[in-house]
Every structure is written in structure tokens, then in C-alpha cells.
Image (cartoon, rainbow, N blue to C red):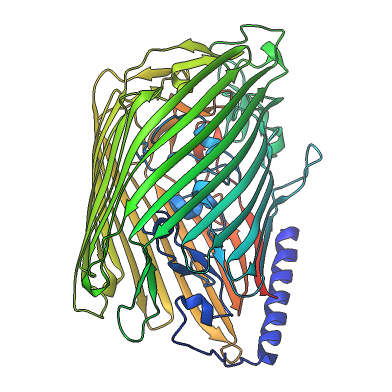
Amino acid sequence: MHALKKLTAIAFFLFLMLGAYAQKQKVPVPKQKMTRADSLRLLRDTTECYTLDNYRLFVLAQQRLIRKDSTLRDLQLWHPALQYYKYPVTDNPGRPVYPILFQPDTLSGFNLGRPNFAFYEFNGRNARYYRTLRPYTEAAYNFANTGLPKEDRRLEQVLNILHTQRISPSVQIGFDFRRITAVGFYQHMWNGLTNVRAFSTYFSPASKYFLVGSFSFNNQRMYENGGLSPLVDFKNRQQLDSLGNPVVALDRKEQYPMNLTSAQNQAQTYDLDLFQGFNIGTRTFRTDSASPEVSIPFFRVSNRFIFRVERYRYIDSTLAQDNFYQNYYFDASRTFYRIYHRNFSGNVEFSFYPFRNKGSFNSISAGVQASYLDVKQDTLFTTTYNVNLFSNLDFEFGEVFRLRARFDYFPLGYNQNDMQLKADLSVGAGRKGRPKIVQLIPGVLFRLAEPAFLQQTMYSNQFIWNNNFAKTRTLQLNFTAVFPRWGLSVGGSAYTLGNFIYYDTTAVPVQAPAAISGYNVWLKYDLTFARNFHFNNFVMHQRTDRDWIRVPPLFFRSNFYYENKLFKKRLQAQIGFDVYYALGFQGYAYMPATGHWYLQNGAMIGNYPYIDVNVNIRIKRFRAFFIASHINQGFPARSEYFVAKGMPMPDRQFRVGISWGLFN
């Protein structure tokens, strides 16, 4: 309570000071000189930061710009997993993400099979490339109380720094930095995650040639406690004996016995991604007399080069003291397990852009990609390669009809005879120049793929297997309907999976003997009433006909807040709360030695409301939030709140965060 009072007083003091600061500020009227020669919106806007639309750049040969979001909407969703799933799916920031929503894998080509580390990493495929006229820096920092310091670790902190600047009219450079350090509520629970990325773009003056590239480094160190011991009665805060009788009362979280006491997961990845294109026959047009010019080539030859290194190490030095693994320590003299993976990949793509009237255009491309791959697991060394043929299609007719598709086929290599087709069709209805009444987006995914490498071959100190699994098959149909005028979206998908691979109750991969069918349907509705009150809802229902995939049949998030401008409209403020809920289901357990979720039959997950209260404020580019998360801890009385078996969600926390974007 003392910490709560201090944090509340600090937040209230900051709120008053910022309000006073906002009162003194004068809002200048920006003077923008607009010239007809401007071909990009950016060139007449020195007060905003933009990002390039990567799909438009790589596939459609357009430099479409997206204004960087500086609003308060969902500012309190500071965690990447919350932003993606709209549900708390980790027990600590930076740790593996629980699969609250089932989605068939769409990775094309070689898959190493370490998915949980990939969720947080920087790489060239998720890089953002910025465009500004003046140097731009954005710093964001937030921290939370997480109980007493332990193991020389303190607090929970997330730091993000972005800097980008234009070196010349053709060159833009920048870097991203993120650091997460988090101490959990239980023994041997800490992780440190560092992500660094440098990026640059070059566009020749006549847009005949461009080069974009990034280099990313990711480093993670995570203490693994294996979850609560089976001898813990979480609901009654007691430790049990082998017969299930209480022997010790547990008053503090640090007293709870855990499954592992010295295990660690360590990961490092290096990723270099370079993409260049040569445009031939560039043309410009305007959709109307007041719009900026848009440039597209008639033909383009492009090349992408990727060099990627992954290093993983799992350490557990307590040997047989940890009665946790089903297949335990084949060699007691070794206390760690290592994976080293390299990927050299390059492709050439030929793209054709036939121009149509009224500003519509087509994009048709074909290309070939070659990759060299190797994997080393301690003394087991494997080398292989891949050859991939691919094609992209994007057909657009005005603002009414759009078809997008990509096809991949592997004639040679590790993934020989793999293929994948992804396509979606967008059809809009409404009057020209006005928001669409409805937009319908059906889609399809067909995938035939080799299982992940580590599902086929594992050689470690905890597990050894050498499988010969058949290719997995996926057929998924998607549908989305968007009603912009009413803030309503509905959608869903149905899928059939053949030869699906899951991890059984012994944490060993198994190929399902029968096909799996499932579906999900969802609804998103944003309601505004009385001008300043907002009630946003997302609800999803999902189901599968086999027990090899386990997901909550229902989960939702409701966000209610009041928003207004204070202090003569200089300070924008939101105050509200979020409610998260998942219906109870038989969930998964987590295996630190492999980084995978596996089936368990000893615990029920979910059936617990998780409530956050938040205050968000904004003055120009300065934003801040104050969150009291899991405010309902203890209500309902003696309820269990678990992400997975033995892994409780975070307890009540108080978090403060700030974000400030500055132009030089």
C-alpha cells in the first residue's frame, strides 16, 4: 500500500505539472508551402514522422507513406503480446507467448522450430523504414513494481529509443533500440532482452534505383523456473506433502517452490536484410487535380539478400535434482545444450506493372530464391539447401475490387515439393469519395510443408529423437466484413489440418493420426456516445474437433474510457478500464528445454476476469500512461489465474510509462 500511495502521488503531481505546462503553451499554426512539383506528401510536411508501407514498396513499387501514430488509442497496451492478442498471454514481459488464438503456420521454406524467441525479435522482415525532413527522436520508458528485489535484479523496465534522420534528399538512416528487464513474482524468474536495429534507405533522384536495408541484433537471457511445483496449493497458499496434506503456509510469492532452480535459456540472433530494385519506364500520375503525384515503373528487377545467424543455449546445472524432464540427462557430464543455425539466402524477382485508367494498376511478378542452410546441435552437424520459385499478383480496379495472391513452390532442397498459396479478395460498396458502406474480404490459404527441423531431429542433453514425419497440409478459408460507418467488423476462418504435429504430455513431438478441423468467429465493435465516452469490444469464439489443439472456446476484451481535452484543450486525457476474460479450458504446459508448449491434463486454465484501470494523457508529442493492472486480484476470492500449467499471470502491478517524440 505504501508503494501504491507513492506512485499515485507521483502520477497526480505529474498530471498537474503537465496541465500547467500545457496552459502556457501556444499552439502555432503550421505554415506549409505547397508546390505542384511535390510528389510525396512528406515533402511539404516537416512536422510529422512517416513510415514506408513495406508491402507497397516491395511488391507494388510505390513509396506510400503512413503517418506515425501519436494518438492515445490503446496506449496502455504497452506489451507486444497485448497489442497482438488483446489478452494477457505471458507471465512476465519478454517470456514465451501463450497461444491464446490458434493460427496455422504460414512460414514458407526452412523452419528451425524455435518459435517463442521469434515473437520479440527485430529482423529485416518486420523492419520499419522512416521518412522525415528533420531528425526525429522518440524515447519511451515504462516501469512497474514487481515485489521485492531478488537475485540482484530489480524492478520491471521497458526502454525504447528510435532515431531517424535524412542525410540527403536520397538517403535516410536510423536505429531502433529496445531493452526489457523483468523480475517476476516467484523464485528464479528474471529475463533480460535487448533488441538493436540499424536501418537505411536510398532512393535515386529519378526513382530509377532504390536500396533499403537493416541489420538487427537480438540478445535474450531468461531464467527458467519450470513453473510452480506440483506440491503448491496456489488457491489456499499452502505447500503440500506427497500425500496432498498441507505442511507449510506460504505467505510470500518468493516462498513458493518451483520445478527448476538454476535453468537458463539464452538466445542470440544476427539478421542482415538488403533489398534493392531497378525501375524501368517510370511514369507519374494524379488520381485527381488536387492529389500528389504517384510514381510507378513499367518494369522492375529486384534482388533481396538475407544473412541470418541464430544461437541458442539451454543450461541446467542442477543435474538430477530437478525431477522435471521425462527423458532426463543422457549424459550427466553435460549441463547445457546448444543450437547454431545459419541461413544465406538470395533471390531475383522480375515485376511487371501494367498501368490502367483512373489511377488503377496491376502488379505481376515472378522470381527464384536460393538458400544455403546449416544447423549444428552440439556434435551433430547438418547442411542443406533450398530452391524456391515464387510469384506475386496484385490486381486493382479503382476503389471497388482488389485481388492479392502469392504462390511459392520448392522444386529442390530440404523443402522439396513444398508449396503455399495465399490469396484474398477485397470488394467495397459505397459512393465514390465517401467512406465505404461495407468492405468484404474473403481469403484462402493452402499449404503443403516439411515439418520444422527440430520437430524431425533433436539431439540434446534432455531429449533425443529422430523422426520421419510426413509433410503437413493446411487448408484455411477466411472472411472479414468491415462496416466503417458503424465501427463494426466481423470475421472468421475455418481450417482443416492434415498430419498436424503437436507435443504430447511427455513434451515429445507426435504427428496426429487423423485430420483436424476447426473454426473461429470474431466481432469487433467500437461505440462512441455522448461525444466523450467510448466502449470498444472484441470477442472471439473458436473450436476444434480434436484435443490435440487446445484453445479457450471464448475470450474477449472490453475497453471503456472517457476522453476529453483539458486546460483550454492543450492536454488530451483518457481514463478508463480494460476487462479481459477467457472461458475455462484444458491448456498447455511449457517445456523450457525445447521452448515449446505441450499437452497437459492436470490443470484448467482461464475462467477468470483480468481487469486493468488506466489513465492516458497527451500534450503534443508527449504521451504518458498510468496503469493499475490486475486490480481485481483476490476477487473472486481465492481464484486461480494462470497463463499455463504452473505459470500464474502477473499479480497486481502499478505501471508508469512515458513517450516523447522530438524533432531537431
Vertical order, 222 against 577 (above or below): above
Q: x%, y% of residue 209? A: 49, 59
Q: Which of 248 and 495 is in front in this view?
A: 495
Tell whether 184 sits left or right of 449.
Answer: right
Q: Which of 246 and 252 is in front in this view?
A: 252
Q: x%, y% of residue 498? A: 26, 26
Vertical order, 347 against 631 (above or below): above
Q: x%, y% of residue 389? A: 34, 35
The residue positioned farthest toward the right in the image shown? 152
Residue 199 appears anywhere in the view: yes
Q: Nearer the viewer, residue 456 or 522?
A: 456
Quadrant (top left, top right, bottom left, bottom right) of the N terminus: bottom right
Residue 315 placement: quadrant:
top right
Residue 606 appears anywhere in the view: no
Tell whether 653 sits left or right of 527.
Answer: right
Vertical order, 430 against 414 (above or below): below
Quadrant (top left, top right, bottom left, bottom right) of the C terminus: bottom right
Q: x%, y% of residue 574? A: 53, 74
The image shows a total of numbered marks equal to 0
Q: Which residue is drawn at 52% across and 72% down?
A: 71
Residue 463 placement: quadrant:
top right
Q: Which residue is drawn at 36% across and 24% down?
A: 412
Vertical order, 650 against 603 (above or below): below
